[in-house]
Amino acid sequence: MIFDTDIFIWAQRANDKALTLMENSAERCLSVQTYMELLQCAANKNQHKYIKDFLASFGFLVLPFTENIGHRASIYIEEYTLASGLRSGDAVIAATAVENNLPLASSNTKHFKMIKELKLFSFKP
């Protein structure tokens, strides 16, 4: 399963449902886009270390940005941004999930629901 950035935010707020979802997932992945978003929100090096340690403690795999992911994300932007407001970061996260044939867990399902080939897991905090 790929986890959207919002799930990590819930987990950092000690949300039991988010932590349980992570613990119970056989495969724990995140897009490099999510990884960058998490680090970007850190205020200092201690928070960077905390994020990296958290990901390591759960055994998360950061999935790289590939040519196919970039191509698919650009198609999603062309198809959906005018009608639904799809943003580039979300397009990359969705494309990463689809290209790796993994479900995406998010509590922001409105960002992704229009992408038909995406296996979307709706998280309710």
Image: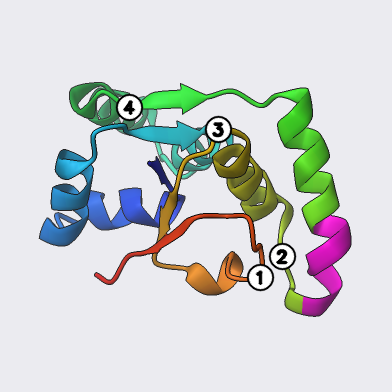
Q: On screen, 56 above or below 32? A: above
What residue sits 33% from the left and 48% below the top? 8
Circles 1, 2 touching at the beta carbon (< 8 Å): yes
* Marks 1 and 3, how far apart at CA: 19 Å
Question: In x, y percent, where is residue 6?
Answer: 40, 57
Q: Which residues are magenta?
A: 77-83
* Disc 4 versus disc 1: nearer the observer: 1
Dot 1 surroundings within 10 Å: few (below 14), some, or many (20 or more)? Answer: some
Numbered disc 1: secondary structure: loop
* Marks 4 and 3, how far apart at CA: 15 Å
* Marks 2 and 3, how far apart at CA: 20 Å
Q: Quadrant of the C terminus?
A: bottom left
Residue denoted by label 4: 60
Point out the tag, 4 or 3, that comes first from the N-terminus: 4
Q: Which mark is residue 100?
A: 3
What residue sits 77% from the left and 35% below the top? 70
- Tag 1: amino acid: Met
Q: Which mark is residue 86?
A: 2
Q: Choose top left, top right, bottom left or bottom right for residue 80.
A: bottom right
Horizontal relation, residue 104 to residue 85: left or right: left
- Tag 2: amino acid: Leu
